Image (tube, rainbow, N blue to C red):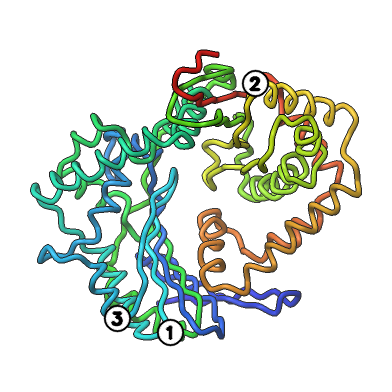
């Protein structure tokens, strides 16, 4: 018997429901009267899930790096060997997927034929087909993808940064895996991982648009088999607090050095609401520190140390297994940028945060949270983290509104410790500085 629970935000004038039933995935339906409908299936299975205890098994098993990404690629072939992308296109639906550290997400966007496209998406996710020939062909395709990334300066810089930050956590390895690791993948291994992770308790289904939630539940029931499997037990990596290296260098075909600055954190709360609070605080803090309107960027720009904006982010998974801040860009002297950045953050921790600056950045973040409710795509994807955390997406606004300058100062001094800073640089070939 299904249970339907509605969540509402009087402030935003928005509502959605969560449909739960035994041995079925949780379904989130967000009614939105826009021209398009967006649907996704999010599986709690990503590149860091390489060591786990399958349901009913006593021991942990370890699989090669890159299996989750490889599996995602192979899901778009049906039992007859046909390309499922073509089936979506015939329905007028734009479909795709991605794999990250902690999830695999399959999605489509359409203005018509929603029910047919939705059924196709669900059937695809629940009924894989892997053959030796398909796996062999995919290994060649993904090998080319891996080698392409190894030629991209920004990707090399980013991946080297993670490897310099983390000792053992698999976040240090490329989501695609390595040429050696994907060579070990077999159809049997893909079926085992699909059976383990693509179960009702380990995925969520999210739809946003002009749909009837009752009909959505019927389509799910018709296409997703009942599953009593529990969520797989992931191996808990004991990651040291210290970084591996303070500085790492590579050389590629670039006209100007590319850099990435990482700040590692292993002090992570087990409480999902506390992690949500920290995530929102970090969105405010990173904007204060790295945005073009901030003091740091303008001081670097005035000294001609940097000419383009930082790209910056706070990365943390809902499970709480890792978190870090990364800021990247290009500069003639990355070491000087790194030095000035560390000095600025250390000084900011000593003197405290300007209240007006904090409030301005908090309002910017708040406006972006509110603004996403104008897009079915942004709504659907922004609901994944709260669904994985088991919290209501509407909690984000009041939590953000309740944050204070003092909260930000405490996090700044706890998280942004100078000995946790790492610099990754990609220099032009022939530059031996």
Is residue 48 among what the camera can see? yes
Residue at 74% across, 31% down: 304
Nearer the viewer's eye, disc 1 or disc 3?
Answer: 3
**Which one is in front, 302 or 385?**
302
The CA span between labels 1 and 3 is 22 Å
The image shows residue 38, relative to residue 420, as above or below, that is below
Q: Secondary structure at mark 3?
A: loop
Circle 1 residue: 214
Residue 376 locus on image (x, y percent): 53, 73
Circle 2 residue: 335
Q: What is the crowding at mark 2: few (fewer than 14 residues within 10 Å), some, or many (at least 20)? A: some
Residue 230 locus on image (x, y percent): 36, 52
The image shows residue 60, relative to residue 14, as above or below, that is above
In which quadrant of the rendered view does residue 362 lie?
A: bottom right
In which quadrant of the rendered view does residue 33 lie?
A: bottom right
Q: Secondary structure at mark 2?
A: helix
Is residue 61 among what the camera can see? no
Q: What is the crowding at mark 1: few (fewer than 14 residues within 10 Å), some, or many (at least 20)? A: few
Residue at 35% across, 81% down: 218
Between disc 1 and disc 3, whose residue precedes? Answer: 3
Between disc 3 and disc 2, whose residue precedes? Answer: 3
Q: Secondary structure at mark 1?
A: helix
Question: In the image, which disc is placed on residue 91?
Answer: 3
Between disc 2 and disc 1, whose residue precedes? Answer: 1
Q: Left or right? Give the position of 186 relative to 354.
A: left
Q: Left or right? Give the position of 272 relative to 402.
A: left
């Amino acid at each position: 018997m299904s249970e339907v629970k509605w969540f509402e935000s009087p402030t935003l004038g928005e509502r959605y429901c969560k449909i739960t039933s035994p041995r079925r995935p949780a379904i989130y339906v967000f009614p939105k009267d826009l021209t398009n409908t967006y649907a996704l299936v999010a599986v709690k299975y990503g590149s860091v899930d390489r060591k786990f205890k399958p349901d009913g098994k006593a021991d942990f098993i370890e699989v090669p790096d890159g299996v989750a990404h490889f599996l995602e690629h192979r899901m778009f072939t049906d039992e007859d060997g046909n390309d499922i992308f073509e089936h979506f296109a015939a329905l007028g639906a734009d479909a795709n997927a991605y794999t990250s550290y902690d999830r695999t997400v399959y999605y489509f966007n359409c203005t018509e034929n929603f029910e047919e496209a939705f059924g196709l998406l669900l059937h695809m996710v629940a009924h894989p087909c892997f053959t030796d020939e398909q796996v062999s062909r995919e290994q060649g395709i993904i090998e080319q993808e891996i080698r392409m990334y190894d030629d991209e300066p920004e990707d090399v810089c980013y991946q080297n940064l993670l490897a310099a930050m983390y000792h053992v956590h698999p976040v240090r390895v490329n989501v695609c895996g390595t040429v050696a690791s994907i060579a070990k993948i077999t159809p049997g291994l893909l079926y085992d991982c699909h059976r383990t992770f693509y179960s009702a308790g380990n995925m969520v289904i999210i739809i946003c648009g002009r749909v009837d939630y009752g009909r959505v539940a019927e389509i799910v029931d018709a296409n997703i088999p009942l599953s009593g499997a529990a969520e797989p037990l992931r191996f808990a990596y004991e990651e040291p607090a210290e970084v591996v290296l303070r500085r790492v260098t590579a050389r590629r075909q670039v006209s100007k050095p590319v850099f990435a600055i990482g700040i590692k954190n292993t002090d992570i709360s087990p409480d999902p609401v506390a992690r949500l609070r920290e995530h929102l605080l970090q969105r405010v803090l990173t904007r204060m520190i790295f945005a073009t309107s901030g003091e740091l960027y303008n001081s670097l720009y005035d000294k001609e140390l940097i000419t383009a904006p930082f790209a910056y982010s706070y990365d943390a998974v809902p499970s709480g297994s890792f978190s870090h801040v990364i800021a990247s860009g290009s500069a003639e002297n990355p070491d000087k940028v790194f030095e000035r950045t560390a000095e600025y953050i250390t000084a900011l921790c000593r003197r405290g945060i300007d209240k007006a600056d904090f409030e301005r950045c908090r309002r910017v973040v708040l406006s972006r949270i509110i603004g996403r409710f104008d897009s079915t795509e942004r709504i659907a994807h922004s609901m994944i983290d709260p669904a994985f955390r088991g919290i209501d997406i509407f909690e984000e606004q009041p939590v953000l509104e309740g944050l204070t300058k003092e909260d930000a100062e405490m996090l700044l001094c706890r998280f942004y410790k100078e000995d946790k800073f790492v610099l990754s640089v990609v220099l032009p070939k022939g530059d031996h500085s």
